[in-house]
Amino acid sequence: MNTKYIFVTGGVASSLGKGIIAASLAKLLQARGLRVTIQKFDPYINIDPGTLNPYEHGECYVTEDGAETDLDLGHYERFLGVHTSKANNVTTGKIYNTVITKEREGAYLGKTVQIVPHITDEIKRRMLLLGGTGEYDIIITEIGGTVGDMESQPFVEAVRQLQWELPEEDLMSIHLTLVPYLSAAGELKTKPTQHSVQMLQQSGVMPDVIVCRTEHPLSPEIRKKVAQFCNVKPGHVIESMDAWSIYQVPLNMHAEHLDELVVRHLDIENFNAPDLSGWEDFLERLRNPKHEVKIALVGKYVELQDAYKSISEAFLHAGAANLCKVKVVRVQSDYLDEGNVEEKIGGMDGILVAPGFGSRGLEGKVTAIRYAREHGIPFFGICLGMQMCVVEFARDVLGYKDAASTEVDPTSTHPVIDMMEDQKKTTVKGGTMRLGAYECELKPGTLAHSIYGKDIIAERHRHRYEFNGDYLEEFEKAGMVASGRNPQTGLVEIVELPSHPFFIGTQFHPEYKSTPEKPQPIFTAFIAAAMEYSGKRKTGARSVPR
């Protein structure tokens, strides 16, 4: 069977959920036994989102091979349970950088380099790249932005060209639109969808399926009207109602027969009913919890929902595994201090200090960590959160009052967190951090070892600074244990306090590898510890550090 290509575009408005529709369809096709991957083409000129502020673009997701990518790749991995790579996220910046570099090398033999054909040829090459590996039956490509945007036009043009270059049964176009409900008129309006599809058709791309995002069910008359004016078959108008969870969307799309439409259109002879039993079990556990805990998520980007997207999703997965509803309370670290810490996080069952960069909000994070350590509240620190628990311990247990990370205080006499040696000569900011999966050797008898149940793990990283090994002996004598280290470099990856009911910090980002059907072990253990703490708090039997 030839590799099949599905392109997902969007119209009317942004943030309709192209990534969730793409991931849901991929999940359904995978459940039928097909080998599927998803790629994202983003129209911005940045090479990648690695240098973007989370307020600009939400979370920067990191792949196993070290690519800094769009957060939608996190959705792809969580839905499919398979790794993406550098090839799965392409930006306009990458496209132009490649073409201009080739021009400087003389690759175009004196020709005038133009958007068509040179830019569109490079886009098409990358669209087909994963299909050429032989690893996949279906490649789903999400085109970022909205049809009609100036920056998206080269990508749409590339899809147009592929529509007549590839066999008809090897390519499919799905367009996601909005069908708004006007409460004053008491009806759904299809005109925005009609205009969006017409704009796509004017670009030469003919959608095979139209997915309509809506707050109210589409009547047969509405479906017929959309089909008639958008030139698709009536059965190819798909309703996408707002769902109680993004993880419900695959089941909704299956009920709309989207996966069946796709396999028929692409002439795929695999008509096995999708096996979604594991997915349905996760949803059942998610929807019917028996417990509830409140977790403080302490960070400086808490106002933006997508800034800590993978952490939020990992809480859902871990909560379902524990039959527990996790109520995440976002706490702005910039406004947290000794005067209000009791009010802000005193009633929490667990405290997670989030990753980040820069000095803003750091002292609030240190305050939250001190409160968790002294009051025996389950604590979990990720990346910068782990570094700040090292700083807090150095200041308040070892007595080094000016202990700091050299990221924010290069003059500290106790730089317990310092820049990695291989980073000190780096001047280029983009794509130069320690990125991707690295091994970590776990110390037997520690909390980390009991959580993972193995000696060697591999987790993903995104950092320039590390625990300063010159201080390790002092820390361990005072009670903070390095329970996980890189076997090649000795880099401290995990610290914990055995005297505390649950206190762990990781230099890596465990949230990146959590999925509904394989929750991340530390998150699962953290929620279990929060449940235990909650039970003891209600009975007045809280444990405190020894």
Image (tube, rainbow, N blue to C red):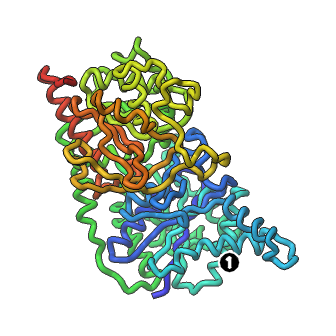
- At horizontal 40% and vertical 62% (from top left) the residue drawn is 24
Taking depth in this image into account, of 196 and 517 the one nearest to the observer is 517
Residue found farthest to the top: 339
Q: Which residue is mark 1?
A: 161
Residue type at the position of mark 1: Gln
Secondary-structure class at tag 1: helix
In the image, taking residue 150 as reference, residue 508 lies left or right, namely: left
Q: What quarter of the picture does the N terminus occupy? A: bottom left
Residue 131 shows in the view: yes
Taking depth in this image into account, of 194 and 83 the one nearest to the observer is 83
- At horizontal 23% and vertical 49% (from top left) the residue drawn is 321
Q: Badge 1: few (under 14), some or many (20 or more) residues near its Cα, within 10 Å?
A: some
In the image, taking residue 271 as reference, residue 190 lies left or right, namely: right
Q: What quarter of the picture does the C terminus occupy? A: top left
Q: Quadrant of residue 378?
A: top left
| Figure check: 277 above or below 441 | below
* Residue 122 picture location, percent across and down: 69, 72
* Residue 381 picture location, percent across and down: 37, 36
- At horizontal 53% and vertical 61% (from top left) the residue drawn is 176
Q: Quadrant of residue 470?
A: top left
* Residue 515 picture location, percent across and down: 34, 55
| Figure check: 343 above or below 189 | above
| Figure check: 174 above or below 500 | below
- At horizontal 55% and vertical 58% (from top left) the residue drawn is 177
In the image, taking residue 46 as reference, residue 481 lies left or right, namely: left
| Figure check: 29 above or below 531 | below
Question: So how many labels did they put on this image?
Answer: 1
In the image, taking residue 34 as reference, residue 203 lies left or right, namely: right
Residue 13 shows in the view: no
* Residue 491 picture location, percent across and down: 42, 46
Q: Quadrant of residue 367?
A: top left
